[in-house]
Amino acid sequence: MQSTELAVSAVLPALCYTGVLADVNAPMSSSELENLRDGRLWNDFCDALKAAGEQVLASGVPGDDLTRAEGFRYLTRLLRLSLEKNIEFADPDHPQFYALSHETAKIGNDNPDNFYLNCAIDGRRDYRITGNRGSVDYLSIETKAGSFAGGGDMAPTGHVELAQLQVAATGDFELIVSAREHTGNWLPMRPESDNILVRQTFRDRYSERPAELKIECLNPQRSDSLDPEQFAGQLQQVVPFVTGTADLFHRWMQLFSAHINQLPPNDQQMCLRSGGDPSIYYHNSYWRLDPGEVLVIEFQPPRRCRTWNFQLSNYWMESLDYRYHRISVNAGTAVAEPDGRVRLVVADTDPGPDFPNWLSTTGHRAGGMLLRYVEAEDFPPVATRVLPRSALQNLEAGDQA
């Protein structure tokens, strides 16, 4: 997501994680083919990957050992994702769903309540998605133009939610994806559309069943065999994705540093242009605590809202490890105050039963944080304050931040 009221336009050229990259479908020059044959293409790839480490040492990055270690681990994770995105799952004629963000590889304040799926497409083709809706609370499917491998914005070119689809009693459904209007379940796209993003939002990630989805291209134009020229272009995109992503979110965190330990709303149009869901309202920020301090966050959830969630992330905007720690809370798991307000306490250790909405910093002293509202109709302000841990005992049920 994007920053708020903070010269956000300064980051627009890099909103999609990378700069302008080579067109993998463009013909290669004879020199590029020679580079492939004699191994220079691989050597260049390795040299560029080595240089990516400079992102972890950039000015403004916290210098503590944990942030430094997570930074280099982050690069290995981005490399895994980029290899899958740009090589293994890059064929729009033979598409497959894959996850560009998950438990051990994360991008841009990934939501712990979400199960993400991505897919390469070509807006000049037609596709059929088939599957079963599972039991997930919220599901949206979007086509996008620009993608993480392109330059500029990544605005949606089509959007559909589960409630808009005709679904059989068994939960099965079929969805046509095309630039041409189609009867029945139809997800629009435009000729320039090049990827699909699926968001599935759980109230309880471990008890709900995610949707099962498959996709096929109805009019493929290419073989599924490895094409040397195409592969060379794909390999050249791998490292720019790594460096571009790391650089982008480092710069976002520098923007968020203008409102540390506060949660102002984002510029929502900027969120849409950077790939956000039009049904979600975003508050992104930066938290930082000294030893012995806690962050108290209070808000009145919107009167009408399908769900909401709040999460903690590290400096690299990776959600903290929700497999082992409670680092997020949502409308289904939060304990409200008697007047309906929600009070969250961000602290390094459990403050006790009087503060059931405790979120662990998992040993971190700083990082990103994000509050999301899904299908909300009003957006109450969010109050925050930093307190000494000893002051928590003086908070009364009616005391507001």
Image (cartoon, rainbow, N blue to C red):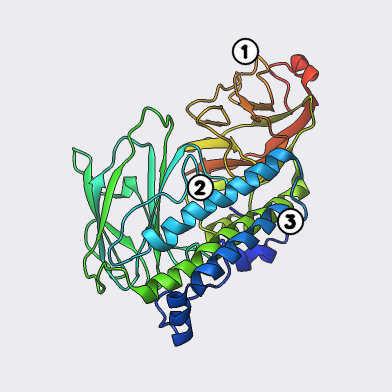
Residue at left offset 56%, top offset 27%? 326
202 vs 163, nearest the viewer: 202
Query: Which amino acid does the dot numbered 1 rest on?
Result: Pro
| Secondary structure of the residue carrying numbered label 3 | loop
Residue 361: name its quadrant: top right
Q: Position of residue 258 (x, y in %)?
A: 77, 50
Residue 48 in view: yes
Residue 138 quadrant = top left
Q: Which mark is residue 353?
A: 1
**Secondary element at tag 1:** loop
Which residue is drawn at the image coordinates 40% and 68% (left, top)?
Answer: 193
Q: Where residue 112 sits in the image (x, y, percent)?
A: 50, 37
- Secondary structure type for disc 2: strand
Which of discs 1 and 2 lies nearer the camera? The answer is: 1
Q: Nearer the viewer, mark 1 or mark 3?
A: 3
Q: Which mark is residue 103?
A: none
- In the rendered structure, the answer to whether residue 83 lies left or right of residue 343 reads left
Q: Nearer the viewer, mark 3 or mark 2?
A: 3
Q: Earlier in the sequence, mark 1 or mark 2?
A: 2
* Circle 1 residues within 10 Å: few <14, some 14–19, many ≥20: few
Q: Is residue 125 above or below residue 382?
A: below
Residue at 73% from the left image edge and 53% from the top image edge:
57
Residue at which label 3 appears: 58
Q: Amino acid at mark 3?
A: Ala
Q: How would you rate the neighbour count of disc 2 (Cα within 10 Å): few for under 14, some for 14-19, many for 20 or more? A: some
Q: Which residue is mark 2?
A: 280
Q: Residue furthest left?
A: 169
Sequence-earlier tag: 3 or 2:
3
